[in-house]
Image: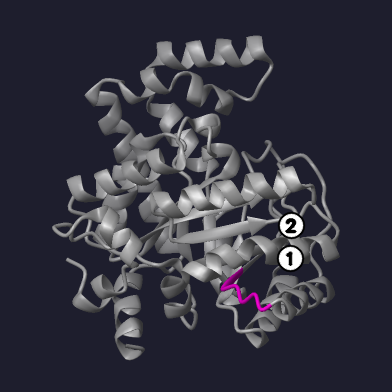
Amino acid sequence: MPNKTMLNRIPERVRHKLGSQSSICLLNGRDLFTGLRDQELIIMACNPRIKHVIPGIMKAAEELDAVVIFELTQTEGGLDGGYTGQTPATFCDTIIAYAEQLKFSKPFVIHADHITVKNSSPAELDSAAALINAQIAAGYTSFAIDASFNPLPDNIALTARLANAVMAEGYGLEVELGEVKPVGSSSDLTSVEESEAFLEGLASHGIKPQLLAINNGSKTGNYLEGEIVDIDLERTRQIYLLTVKYGLAGLVQHGITGTPLRLVGKLADFGIRKGNIGTLWQNVAYAGLPLELMDAMRLWAKEQQKNIKYATAVFKGEIDAIPAANIKQIAEMAYREAKEFLTAFRAKGSASKLAKALEQHT
């Protein structure tokens, strides 16, 4: 069971949502990131596009005494449910229900990954603001604002404008500089000079994030056969040292699916403090879904000429209702994967380390 210090750190809005009898520890992202900032470990952030992987992740975190983050991007779980069919309220309720059902005792965070702002139009800003408001109401305690699609001055202005709502609540804040693109595409890496200009610009607006997501060479999605994972570790280190000067806790690593565990284990040495894993959990779920359901999803994707991930919302009813044997298989596979990554991330014992850090700052 979480200790008293941790339970006292649960935001009042979230505490009200959980109910007075709940003992689960849905923590503020800001407390998590700042509490573990001096630890050379990576907090595992999981995007469970299909809910059946969640019990396995929680089981691994419980066993290893590890903090964990559950997150969805705007495209995965926006106001309309995105391509997973999970609205902010649906997603939060699902995570909380599993935590209570499994008596999950470790602290966790529900994080809004990639709240994207692709341009400076009023409609784009209003849409992003509406999503943030819905996520706050649903129980999210951490937010990633991603205006990296825009030129640097616009990225600063747009991020600052939207970050005010997050900072007003006192929740965790992640910002992004350098768009990480899918496997098979190319993109410019984030530079130290850009990072300094970005953080300085945000500071001039009074914005103080805990995390900075960068493009250091990783890719999102499944790596193609023979494609080499090429992460610029020295560049990562230099940007991390810069962020420390601005009071940040560290950097965020995207595109971990397909990254060798031997490399994953080194990332904490270079300032990575949050590691996002999304496609892996989708792969795990697909491996355990009934074959006839997977065939139907593949046929739909082929007919619609879309990536199969977009079939998730379309077939959500069937996915949620798969046989118990399949659910168990997916949970067991997710447990094994989560345990491997938590170990590689050096996250074993991170829950106890966080508890100690929070006690010292109470």
Residue placed under numbered mark 2 in the picture: 217
Q: Is residue 242 left or right of residue 153?
A: left
Can residue 157 be seen here? The reply is yes
Tell me the magenta residue range.
Answer: 206-211
Give the structural element (helix, strand or loop) at label 1.
loop
Where residue 341 is drawn, which disc sits there? none
Tell which residue pokes out farthest to the left in this image: 21
Answer whether residue 208 is magenta in the image. Answer: yes
Residue placed under numbered mark 1 in the picture: 232
Q: Please state the horizontal and vertical placement of residue 296, each as a whole percent of the image.
A: 49, 11
Which amino acid, by three-letter code, is at mark 2?
A: Gly
Label 2, residues with CA under 10 Å away: few <14, some 14-19, many ≥20: many
Relative to 272, residue 264 above or below:
above
Which amino acid, by three-letter code, is at mark 1?
A: Asp
Toward the viewer: 170 or 60?
170
Real-space Cα distance between discs 1 and 2? 6 Å
- The reply to whether dot 1 and dot 2 touch (C-beta < 8 Å) is yes
Query: What residue appears at the point 49 percent right and 77 percent down from the top-left corner?
Result: 40
Query: What residue appears at the point 72 percent right and 43 percent down from the top-left corner?
Result: 123
Mark with earlier residue (1, 2)? 2
Can residue 266 be seen here? The reply is no
Relative to 305, residue 207 above or below:
below
